[in-house]
Amino acid sequence: MKKALITGIRGQDGAYLAKLLLEQGYQVYGADRRSSDSSYWRLEKLKIKDKVKIIYMDLLEESNVYEVMRTYKFDEIYNLAAQSFVQVSFNQPLLTANVNSMGTLRILEAIRLFSRDTKFYQASTSELYGKVQEIPQRETTPFYPRSPYAVSKLFAHWITVNYREAYGMFNVCGILFNHESPLRSIEFITKKVVNGVCKIKLGLVDKIEVGNIEAKRDWGYAPEYVYGMYLMMNHPNPDDFVLATGEIHSVKELIEKAFSLVDIYISWQDKDGKIIGVDQQGKIRVQTNQEYYRPSEVDILVGDYSKAKQILGWEPKVKFDKLIEIMVEEEMKELKEKK
Ligand code: NAP
Ligand code: G4F
């Protein structure tokens, strides 16, 4: 039985990956940083909480990371833990760098010193492409990070590659484009919009407030992306892969799609106060708020996943329309249950 450690077990990807690895017959350990909020709601929702062994490991605590590696000697480690919210990284750049960059290096050093045969997956990101140098972005596209988050992930990406080349370690980087699901945290735009739209439909709130609606992203479905991580780790040669859908949509389209699914026309108020469109009940449903704009934005991301398709046989089935339908349906169900 293979033994895998997932850091970031409480996050969206951690939960889906744990479920997948359990189904594949792995013994799954989840690294959790200790906090007063002991909720494992995602693992509970997927009905796997009792099957995952929780280990306390904070990426900020070097001796903790070393001790865990020395004790368990895992077959595989999936490093999903991160300060993963781009906007917060502008307010907490040092913490972001410490967790995302140095946290990754702490694990790599621990593997190098105590558990050399452990395979390592690093959660790299399409944010590395930032101010894009090529459309679509692929593994060979030069990076141009645009936030402290992206810069921190750039270090983590290259140090993972460097340890592979310098020490012959089995290290892979998954350069994943945005992937979403009903388990997404509320601060990210897909979940924020879906939650807001469903609450408007149920009469719980009047409007949603958002930032830059012109930004464009390549949004996929998280359970399919964690399958890609598994394929990368189980391929004979360690390498780096883009996972994406190849489809591009703006935040504006995301909002329009979500409202259309609950049959509400939208009236918008832009950041200069101008009102566009009329809602059936004469209400402003979407307001643009400067608070949600970023000091430097990533305007467009769209990935070319042909390497993953060719070498791993990975291909996404759920594209934008279906993704938003899944999220709206699940959100509506949950809100009605709570009501
Ligand atoms: P997420 O939901 O934000 O989960 C991140 C997890 O990291 C959380 O469970 C968090 O713990 C944990 N964490 C934060 N600081 C830590 C620390 N100091 N020590 C230990 N654990 C810590 O992220 P996700 O969406 O699942 O993404 C997984 C990974 O993929 C992240 O590294 C992210 O940057 C990367 N990524 C995500 C996407 C995407 O679209 N989802 C795309 C590309 C790359 P708490 O629960 O205690 O806060
Ligand atoms: O949903 P977002 O916060 O995701 P973002 O910044 O693309 O980052 C996510 O995907 C990355 C992969 O590309 C991951 F590495 C990262 O960890 C995270 O999972 O924002 C998407 C876009 C941005 O352009 C943002 O400016 O939506 C725009 N946006 C407009 N209004 C908003 C809002 N984003 C958020 N979160 N909230 C708003 O109100």
Image (cartoon, rainbow, N blue to C red):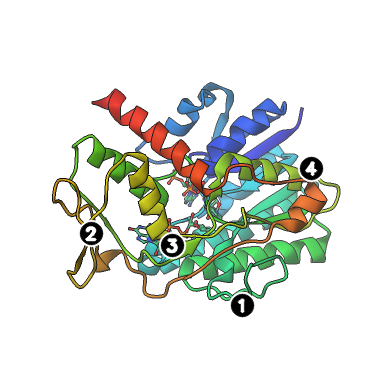
Q: Which tag, 4 or 3, sits closer to the chain's start?
A: 3
Q: SS for tag 2?
A: loop
Q: CA distance from mark 1 to mark 3?
A: 20 Å
Looking at the picture, which amino acid does disc 2 mark? Gly
- Please say if 189 is above or below 148: above
Numbered mark located on residue 133 in the image: 1
Q: Residues within 10 Å of mark 2 (few under 14, many from 20)?
A: some
Looking at the picture, which amino acid does disc 3 mark? Val
Numbered mark located on residue 277 in the image: 2
> Between residues 46 and 119, which one lies in front from this camera angle?
46
Q: State whether residue 112 appears in this view.
A: no
Front disc: 1 or 2: 2
Q: CA distance from mark 4 to mark 3?
A: 30 Å
Residue in the picture at 54% in, 25% down = 48
Looking at the picture, which amino acid does disc 4 mark? Asn
Is residue 52 left or right of 193 when viewed as pictured?
Answer: right
Q: SS for tag 1?
A: loop
Residue behind label 4 places its C-beta within 8 angstroms of ligand 1: no
